[in-house]
Image (cartoon, rainbow, N blue to C red):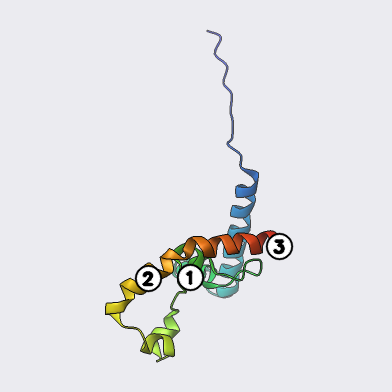
Amino acid sequence: MGIKNRYSTPAYSLGNGQAEVVNKVIVSGLKKMLDDAKDKWLEELPHVFWTYQTTPRRSTGETPFSITYGAKAVIPLETRYPTLRTNSFTPGSNDSLLKKSLDFIKERRENVMVQLAYYQ
């Protein structure tokens, strides 16, 4: 019948390398948190993800969370103890403040790209 089976793999070398680095960081974080309790990795995975999303990158000085959402994340510890950020929070003005910060997110991302290019 003349049928030839050919396999192809979509490759985006830069993206694939970035995914491997992220995976390596996440696995490393899990190993550090689970020294003795290897069977509890599923419970610790959200904490490792949160840590990854809220830790500033050396190359950009920004967190992945802030680049994505245009605001700094409130860590769980800040919700338990009164801080300036949590005490000055008012739900009524939160939406308008988020809209203002989203207006500047494109500029912040451009600044991060410049910083990243300078870092490399």
Q: Secondary structure at mark 3?
A: helix
- Residue that label 1 marks: 50
Q: Earlier in the sequence, mark 3 or mark 2?
A: 2
- Residue that label 2 marks: 98
Camera-near label (1 vs 2) is 2
- Amino acid carrying label 2: it is Leu
Instruction: Tell me the distance, in whole angstroms, between the alpha carbons under discs 3 and 2.
Output: 29 Å
- Which of these two is toward me, 94 or 36? 94
Instruction: Tell me the distance, in whole angstroms, between the alpha carbons under discs 1 and 2.
Output: 21 Å
Q: Earlier in the sequence, mark 1 or mark 3?
A: 1
Q: Is residue 71 left or right of 119 when viewed as pictured?
A: left
Q: Residue at x 61, y 71 (%)?
A: 61
- Which of these two is toward me, 116 or 79? 116
Q: Residue at x 35, y 84 (%)?
A: 89
Q: Residue furthest bottom?
A: 82
Q: How many marks?
A: 3
- Residue that label 3 marks: 118
| Residue contact between numbered discs 3 and 2, judged by CB atoms under 8 Å | no
Q: Secondary structure at mark 1?
A: helix
Q: Residue at x 57, y 16 (%)?
A: 4
Quadrant in the rendering for residue 11? top right
Q: Is residue 93 left or right of 18 when viewed as pictured?
A: left
Kindly identify which numbered label has been placed on residue 89. Answer: none
- Amino acid carrying label 1: it is Trp
Q: Earlier in the sequence, mark 1 or mark 2?
A: 1
